[in-house]
Amino acid sequence: MLYPQSNRYRWVTNLNGIWRFEAVGDSYSPATPLQGGGLTAVPASMNELVTDPSISNHVGRVVYEREFSIPQLPECEYRLRLGAVSHRCEVFLNGEKLGEGINGYDPVDLQLEKLSEKNRLTVVIDNRLTNHTFPAGRLKKERQIINHDFYNFTGIHRDVLIYTRPKRCIQDVIIQTVVGGNYHRVRAEVHTSCKRLHLTVLDRDGKAVAESDGGELWISEPMLWSPASPYLYTLAVETESDRYEERFGIRRVEVKGDSFLLNGEPIYFKGFGMHEDFFLLGKGNNGAVNIRNFELLKWIHANSIRTSHYPYSEEILSLADEYGILVIDEVPAVGMNWWEENYGENGIDDTTLALHRELIKRLHARDKNHPSVVMVSVANEAATNEAPAKAYFENVMGYARELWALPITVVEFYHAEETLASQFADVICINRYFGWYYDHGDLSVIEEQMKNELCGWHDRYQRPILVTEFGCDTVEGLHALPAESFSEEFQWAYFEACGKAFDACPFCIGEHPWAFADFKTKQGLTRVRGNRKGVFTKDRQPKSGARYLRERWKNIK
Ligand code: BDP
């Protein structure tokens, strides 16, 4: 799947902006234009824009609609691409169904065949989560039960693009780089119905450094991609009727013994799990917010992120390539705690498994050429301790490994001796909240408990361990000496205690405090306007913990 681009053969426009909007019942039909309702914005979540709680918390269907007119160019195929619609959608053009989206975090890319002078585009969104959606959820009457800790935002969350491509076009470009010796191989697999093919690798200055008429290219003395030097090349693919340019980086990723190696050098992961979440925008992708996030990652000396708990926008991944931020790419399998054997027809079953595999495939189709993606996570905190988890995770992790030439992992909540999933992981990833969800407020237990935990995992699996979550809710401006939970002093001391444990474990390959910034959740007794474990506030200013981490990470190369 290629991201749309514009050149002499291709053209892109966007349909972002103001759309008509209405929360509707199941009897709604797109045959006639939307009559009632109001207005909303794209990309954004509708929940943050309306003031009526019954709409903001609406469980069910909402309709987005707008008109558009575009120039009709000869000899090309028109396509519509919705970057992400949460969670499922049906798309109609002038009342006729074009297709559907099955998940809230990957693009819906559809052919536009019958364009008129004036067109009505209708997107019917369903935000209900069941055992057959990702994230999974359950419905009790019309009440939505979710098992994950972020707000169930609804809307068109990423750009809506219309693009053309020639009838005979380049459909896909898969780039693999092989690092070794003085020459480095770039293998390009081009899917196309065109006859003639020419490939050119351009360096950062636009100078051609390798050319071929297909297949492999060799680059001598290339610049390798790494966080310290995120060097990007461009592969220009040209045919008799089309052209496409894809950026890529040359790098080698391996897990060896207790180390995670990038270009042969051990990596220590410093960074965060985060969320796509900002004031008013909800999960709407926004360039300014994205840039601020990456600037803060650099400021704090981070080198990595995990796309907890779903694939982030393509724009974010492109920025990660450019800023040199390593990405652990996660599919939206979060809080899967409902196995069929306990929950019957509301449980996770073969249909769930098939969708999970499909989402891993789509993640690969979308993200395969990003050098920043160095590991794939198939789930966060599933009930990996229950009997069905073994075959299930063996299946999805095996499938991920067939697609990606990268380490595969699963992020664990259960203990080393309980889980049936981590045996299939190349890197052990664990989330731990000592001193917070257990022994709340007791800073003195954290270092020892964390150390014991890490050693326990290592004794059993003999693999590198990355702590993908640890942290404490912190209200900015709240101070207490001696430190008390929720204060800025506590966050500082909490990270210090965890850091001592990590430093004592040579097989610990990194630390991702939870979370990058505060974010919205459903309301709850432990959530004061959302989850406050952010190292940065929701408006992206540092709390005390950020200053501690900045000093610590500056000295970890
Ligand atoms: C972990 C989850 C994460 C939560 C976090 C928390 O992976 O999504 O937000 O706990 O409770 O279990 O803050």
Image (cartoon, grey):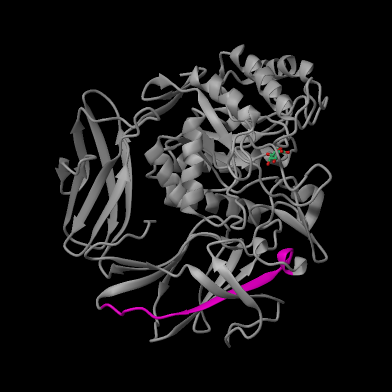
Q: Is residue 549 above or below residue 47?
A: above
Q: Quadrant of residue 324?
A: top left
State the image coordinates of residue 557 (x, y, percent, origin top left).
45, 19
Query: Residue 136 or 56: which is nearer the viewer?
Result: 56
Q: Residue at x 65, y 37 (%)?
A: 534
Residue drawn at x 30%, y 30% is: 224
Number of numbered discs present? Answer: 0
Judged left or right of residue 441, residue 219 is left
Q: Quadrant of ligand 1?
A: top right
In the figure, 479 relative to 382: above or below?
Answer: above
Residue at the (56%, 39%) spot, across then down? 377
Residue span colored magenta: 55-73
Residue 456 in view in this figure: no
The percent coordinates of residue 13 (x first, y second) are 37, 68
Name the image quarter holding residue 532. top right
Q: Position of residue 480 (x, y in %)?
A: 78, 26
Side of 181 where 67 appears, left or right:
right
On whether residue 301 falls in the magenta region, the answer is: no
The verdict on residue 63 being magenta is yes
Residue 515 location (% of width, % of height): 63, 37
